[in-house]
Amino acid sequence: MKILHTADWHLGKLLEGRSRLEEQKIVMEQLVAMADERQADMVCVAGDIFDNGHPSAGAEALLYQTLKDLSNEGERLVVLIAGNHDQPSRLEAVIPLVREHGILIYGTPRSKIESGQYGKFQIESLDEGVFSFEKGGEQAVVACVPYASERTLNEVLYRDQEEDQERAVTYAQKMQELFAKRARWFSKDTINILMAHVFTLGCIKDGSEQSLSLGNSYLLPMETFPEEADYVALGHVHRPQKAVGSQGRIRYSGSPLPYRLQETTVAKECLLVTLHPGQKPETEDLYFDNPKPIEKWVCGDCQAALEKCMENQDRPCYVYLHIHTDSFIREEQIKELKKYKEDILEVVPLFPSRDREEEKGNFLEKSFQELFTEYYAERKGVEPEEELLETLTEIIEKEREYETDLDKD
């Protein structure tokens, strides 16, 4: 069975006040083409479908057209879960209209669909957030866990429990309990898939998503996830990556487009995952062609900046323009630059006295992984392999846990 794993579409998201809908339309068409070319049996969209709970009409229209095209007239199952940017009730409002196309939507951890025909698939609803279906002689069980705040988790897990009964204390423990309840439907004879919208311990966030609580309470360690799951399709982090220590069984697909400058260092992709009962997943990275990159230009002076704008005036790209200068850049100079390159998002003058301060600020803003990657690339001439970064991250996290234990003692 082949599934296409994608997430964090953020349809309707703006960049410095500018619409990205046209670019999003292009990458959504690429996604549909990938699903068709690779003959995916199911598409898993792991949250943050929209960028906010009140999307524009254009963003909604793009979603519905994309879902219709992905479903291929009901021949392909499409499963969506809500992320923290989505309004669950708004997503679920269209369930009566999309069911005949083979599209399933889970807005909250308590959502439970009806059993029956969805497109060309016979779906059996097993529990809240859990369903099964058959394709090509193989049975799959899919557990769906939309984004859940701590308050939501308490409502889901303990709504029928007495106040004085024992409860999990931390967010990670509660998520582990929820995952375990979903995983009880998994068996050795089925393909077991878990979809969730969460942060994992050691994930690299590129600044795209900020932690939703103080400290690391919303970061889930590997033991949180059920071992019975053959593949865990995650959303919430915009950089594609394997969860640390998962050997590729637990993965983030990342977003289909970079949504800020910090996200431009890694190619954007979705994942084609081939699964069979009791076997390790086989994963293929499918890359998107970014129709309009986000770039940072650093120019020696205003004349050099003008020349660069003229050279690139016909090339589609957004630009953060940094110019070394001894004086402030005048408004007429900025207008001249934008005459040739209208998609300049920001013009930043770099004064001699501020250069070192900016470098210091950038240094302080970077994570240890980013600093290590830059150092490694400078010394070796190539970036470190992903496995090396995973090992390094695991060592750091274990050291932090050790220090925490010492503090407790």
Image (cartoon, rainbow, N blue to C red):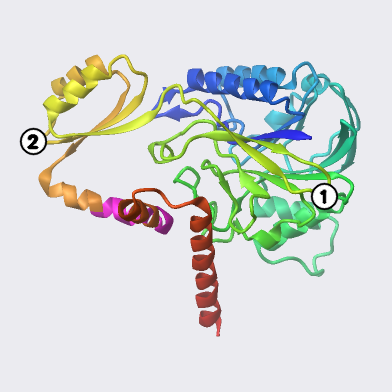
1 and 2 marks in contact (CB < 8 Å): no
What type is the residue that disc 1 sits on? Answer: Gly
The secondary element bearing badge 1 is classed as loop
- Residue 368 % position (x, y): 40, 59
Quadrant housing residue 40: top right
Tell me which label, 1 or 2, sits earlier in the chain: 1
Q: Mark 1 or 2, which is nearer the eye?
A: 1
The residue that appears at 35% across and 53% down in the rendered structure is 380
Label ID, residue 327:
2
Separation of residues labelled 1 and 2 (CA atoms):
66 Å
On screen, residue 400 versus residue 77, left or right, reads left
The secondary element bearing badge 2 is classed as loop
Quarter of the image containing the C terminus? bottom right
Quick one: label 1, few (<14), some, or many (20+) residues within 10 Å? some
Q: Is residue 169 magenta?
A: no
- Residue 346 % position (x, y): 28, 30
Label ID, residue 278:
1
In the rendered structure, which segment of residues is drawn in magenta? 360-371
On screen, residue 329 versus residue 278, left or right, reads left
